[in-house]
Amino acid sequence: MGHQRRSRIMTQTAPIAPPARIVVFGATGTTGKEVLKQGVARGYEMVGVDLGGDDALPEGAVQVDANVLEDDLTRVMYGASAVISCLGVGNAIATLIDPPPLYSTGTERIVQAMQGAGVSRIVVISATFVAANDRGPLLFRLGTAPALHNVLEQMEEMERMLAASPLDWTAVRPGWLMAGEKTGGLVVQEGEIAEGLIRTRHADLAGFMLDCVEQGIWSRAYPAPARKEDEEAESNAEVLKAMMA
């Protein structure tokens, strides 16, 4: 709740309510953990799927170890009301140049598993930069956005695949992601983030993805959420810090 929308809410679908089961891929990433934490707080049965290891999931979430590119994913889907994919790649230059096919092959395998288990609702993370490359400070437009070229190509492939599928999908296109507490103050419009905005908090993104599932909104659409942040968070200096991290 509390999201400002500058575009009509697109096709609606069946909402869900606690204690429904939601399966989350990319569960140990920043957004994935936020989805799990907020979903548990709302009363859902949250199942987090990731490679495993020492990175613990938020309290109350059920952990399933699986490689989205190799393992049988159908077993995780049974009993689920919806899937939220927070799959993503790291920021290392080598990874950005040759990213693993998480958005393309990974999402394709998730879709196949959903169909095998009779699950139809999925919300995924894409990016506003699939549609717009003129947002943000100069250094971001000249440096970071071009570095994401191969990742964005995968995201485009993911979106095409979802659009061609019979699933009830939502491809969320946030801006440049950042840390911070959940605000509920997002501006959401169809296709690309609003002019003058660039940042999207992981926590706000997680809450919005849960809202899409819970309220049955933005079905077969590309909502783009972002919000105005302070000057420093949107600056060239912040781009440099991110590039050097």
Image: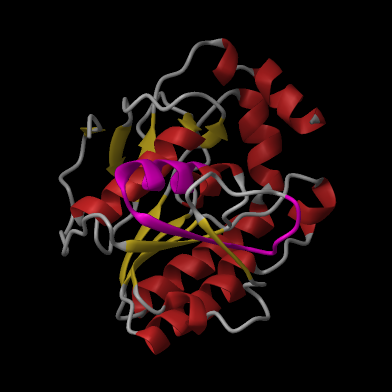
Front-lying residue, 159 or 213: 213
Query: Looking at the rendering, in which quadrant would you find the N terminus?
Result: top left
Residue 191 appearing in the image = no
Colouring of the image: secondary structure
Toward the top, the furthest residue is 231
Residue 80 appearing in the image = yes
Q: Point out residue 47 in the picture as x, y percentages from the top left corner.
A: 47, 61
Residue 45 falls inside the magenta stretch: yes
Toward the bottom, the furthest residue is 116
What segment is highlighted magenta in the picture? 34-54
Q: Point out residue 19 in the picture as x, y percentages from the top left corner.
A: 28, 57
Q: Point out residue 65 in the picture as x, y percentages from the top left corner.
A: 64, 68
Query: Looking at the rendering, in which quadrant would you find the C terminus?
Result: top right
Q: Point out residue 234 in the picture as x, y percentages from the top left corner.
A: 55, 19
In this picture, is 168 found above or below 134? below
Residue 72 falls inside the magenta stretch: no
In this picture, is 197 found above or below 57? above
Q: Quadrant of residue 142?
A: top right
Front-lying residue, 48 or 221: 48
| Label tally | 0
Q: Quadrant of residue 119?
A: bottom left
* Left or right of 63 in this view: 115: left
Q: Which residue is pictured at 75% across the width and 24% down the height?
A: 240
Front-lying residue, 241 or 115: 115
Q: Which residue is pictured at 47% across the width and 82% down the height?
A: 113
* Left or right of 228 in this view: 120: left
In this picture, is 132 found above or below 12? above
